[in-house]
Image: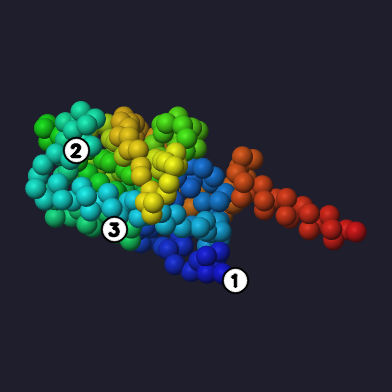
Amino acid sequence: MSQYYKKSSNIFDPKSNNHFKLSRSKIDLFMECPQCFYLDRRLGIGRPPGFPFTLNSAVDALLKKEFDLYRKEKTIHPLIEEFGIDAIPYQHKEIDTWRNTFKGIEYLHTPTNLLITGAIDDVWINSNGELIIVDYKATSKTSEVNLDAEWQRGYKRQMEIYQWLFKKNGFKVSPTGYFVYCNGDTGKPFFDKKLEFDIKVIPYTGDDSWIEGALGEIKECLMSDKIPEMNPECDYCNYRKNARDAKIKHGKK
């Protein structure tokens, strides 16, 4: 069996007293579909992986390099200035750790014994000393980018978890974060070996009040020996159900 589908590490053991590491993305998985979350974190059966968005990763890496130049000089980035934001890139000794996918910023939530982690893209700081959480996004669409689609609720939860993590680590955090949204321009007459982007910095005021309750539900889910009901709107749940039903029906022929 593919290693992606059957996991052997970081599987929740209800008999263990050790803290359990839970990433921001797994919290979002629970919010999307408790059954898929349970199969993944309790039974070790993960969803099939998607293809890596290497172009998005390239945009992410280049933005980090660019903002780091202004971070080092403690000066305002042109995009921050263009959108009238009171901020400069935040300089901190842990910035590279916070951005590391395998580490990130961590907080042990003692009521559940869950170690919550999240790897941010960037942090700015305003004149009031508040940290501003920043996330990079890349796409290519003919319409103007925004945060209005239902599927982008996951983006907003992502921002809120990051804000919560920094607050729990004792930082003063602005409730308003920003998405640096890069939209590839396909309207050029020639490719000329380069792809140009229109960049929009979109503010979002987060509300992390849901997180404490969600962590309690997650712990309860993990401790249970019962698999949660399928989410009728989950493509993965529906695939499993339809495949199972088809096999049963075929076996009766």
Mark 3 surroundings: few (<14), some (14-19) or many (≥20) residues within 10 A: some
Residue 20 percent across, percent down from the top left: 38, 58
Front in this rendered view, residue 236 or 33: 236
Q: Earlier in the sequence, mark 2 or mark 1?
A: 1
Q: Secondary structure at mark 2?
A: helix
Q: Is residue 211 visible?
A: no
* Lower position in the chain sequence, tag 3 or tag 1: 1
3D distance between C-alphas at marks 2 and 3: 25 Å
**Residue beneath disc 2:** 78
Tell me what residue is drawn at x 61 percent, y 50 percent: 236
Would you call the spot at circle 1 few (<14 residues within 10 Å), some (14-19), or many (20 or more)?
few
Residue 169 in percent (x, y) is at: 21, 46
* Disc 1: which residue: 1
Position of residue 201 in the picture relative to residue 125 (left or right): right
Nearer the camera: disc 3 or disc 1: 3
Q: Nearer the viewer, residue 21 or 207?
A: 207
Q: Is residue 147 left or right of residue 125?
A: right
Q: Residue at coordinates 12% horizontally, 31% vertically from top-left?
A: 128
Residue at the disc numbered 3: 100
Q: Amino acid at mark 3?
A: Asn
* Element under disc 3: loop
Quadrant containing the C terminus is bottom right
Q: CA distance from mark 3 to mark 1?
A: 29 Å
Return the residue found at the far left. Answer: 73
Alpha carbon separation for disc pair 2 and 1: 49 Å
Residue 137, image quadrant: top left
